[in-house]
Image: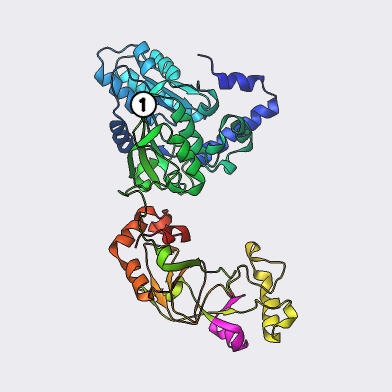
Amino acid sequence: MADSACLELDLAPKGGEIAMTVAVDQLHHATALYTRSPVVDALLSEAGWFEPGKRLCDPSAGDGAFLDTALRSVLASVADPDDGLILHSIEGWEIHPGACRDAHDRLARTLAGHGWRTADALALAKRIVHRGDFLTEAAPQPQWDVIAANPPYLRYCKVPSALRAVYDVAVPEHARADLLHAFLSRCADMLNPGGVLAAVTSDRWCFNAQAANLRAVLGKSLRVRHLNRIDGDSAFYRPKNRRSGTPPRVHPVTVVLERADGDGIARLDGSPIYPGSTDVGATGRTLADIATVKLAPWLGTPGIFVVKPDVAARLPADWLIPVADGKDFTGGVFSGPKAFAIRTEGVSCLEELPGAIVDHLKRELPRMCRRGRRDRCWLPPETWINKFDLSQPSIVVPRICHGLTAVEIPPGILPIDHGLSIAQTPGMSLDSVMEALQAARARQWIAARAPRLEGGFVSITTTLLRSLPV
């Protein structure tokens, strides 16, 4: 069949053709991360593939891993399958020409191993996998019983401009935060009644706030049948032309979304969903009911508004306050302050500060990073005066950590660097708050919900911590 993408490029101005070719290469370089066979096998099994008469599509075929496994199931289940049955059963789309050739070659080898002549096998493989853009070229109506894929993950703002200009027209508003969202949305529209979408995805769409509208729209027709975390280090491999560099920061899950037609069936909604969690969310009292949770201030490049003791010794003591950050916590215990913040808030100009502080700031402020600079240069990047009651002890929860850890710090110490500062509320002792934070169920609840980072770290936000059940 004719390749519509090629026809469009042939008719486009030469500059547009080049721009689109470059954009497709850039997209492939940013997103090409292929799925290993054990993950593919398990996901297709979870999706219930293969049944005679059913149709499967991979909208982002890559080198054909999903399609090849699906094809092998067809060949193993049907005696003497012909081209027509195979073409009815499986179909794929791949936007990158090199990856598309890899998929053709892979399927052709499988077909040749089952009796097709080499030329016929390659010709059939080329009819199975279309080189084109699924988001703009696949017929937008229900037509598949299983959609199985490892779709690309890339924030929409990072999609090459030539492609983004096309997607701005084709992709609905609720699906524009990430290219993954666009694929999930379009796939949902193309499932037959009773169909399933089985995918390897980044976990962020499951719980990020900017994906709430996507979840709500998907939930109009889909429910979650399966959701499980997998190991990103072992689940993927790079295509052969992507040997250099490091893998994207992906924290993958496998998900099966089932077309849920009819009333009375639990579906998705805009609420977050958490891989590995068996409950929906917090009920009853939360941490926000018994304590105040605030984000500790970030005071900019070290050595300017936060100074070490040797520098602090040369500055007026009544303009300094000891600080606590993650480096001061050892084994869940505050080891004592090792730095001091300069109190410059509350003055209207640099000259109102003591001379030693003015000299220090004039000398050090040129080192301030771009995001920490302010027009009133004598002020730190984030305000903290009058926001924290330093007359009382408090609890700090490190925001970036290996798991929920709560550390009590004494009065007179300012938490910094975006740690989560917790102060007691009237009628609730700090000991009671600490007990709630140290409970095993609290650690388990946070572990199931906190976004994964690299090296086994997680990110605990104020919103997440405030909703912790106690």
Question: In the image, is residue 204 part of the stretch drawn in magenta?
Answer: no
Q: Tell me the crowding category of disc 1: few under 14, some 14 to 19, or many 20 or more residues within 10 angstroms, Cα based.
A: many
In the rendering, at what x and y percent does residue 235 appear?
35, 42
Question: Is residue 314 shown in magenta?
Answer: yes
Reply above or below: 135 against 465: above
Residue plotted at (40% across, 67% down): 290
Figure quadrant of residue 169: top right
Is residue 158 at all visible to an observer of this figure? Answer: yes
Q: Judge by depth and name the residue closer to the eye, 337 or 260.
A: 260
Image quadrant in which the C terminus is located: bottom left
Rendering quarter of residue 190: top left
Furthest residue to the front? 427
User: Is 212 placed above or below 455 here?
Assistant: above
Q: Position of residue 319 (x, y in %)?
A: 61, 84
* Number of residue marks: 1
Residue in the foreground of this view, choosing between 421 and 58: 421
Helix, strand or loop under label 1? strand
Which coloring applies here? rainbow
Kindly tell me whether residue 32 is visible in this rendering.
Answer: no
Q: Look at the picture and state if 203 lies above or below 336.
A: above
Residue at position x 47%, y 61% in the image? 462
Which residue is pictured at 47% across the width and 36% down the height? 217
Q: Give coordinates of residue 251: x percent, y percent.
A: 41, 48
Measured as percent of width and height from the top left, residue 198 is found at 37, 33
Name the kind of residue labelled 1 in the image.
Gly
Tell me which segment is drawn in magenta: 303-321
The residue labelled by disc 1 is 195
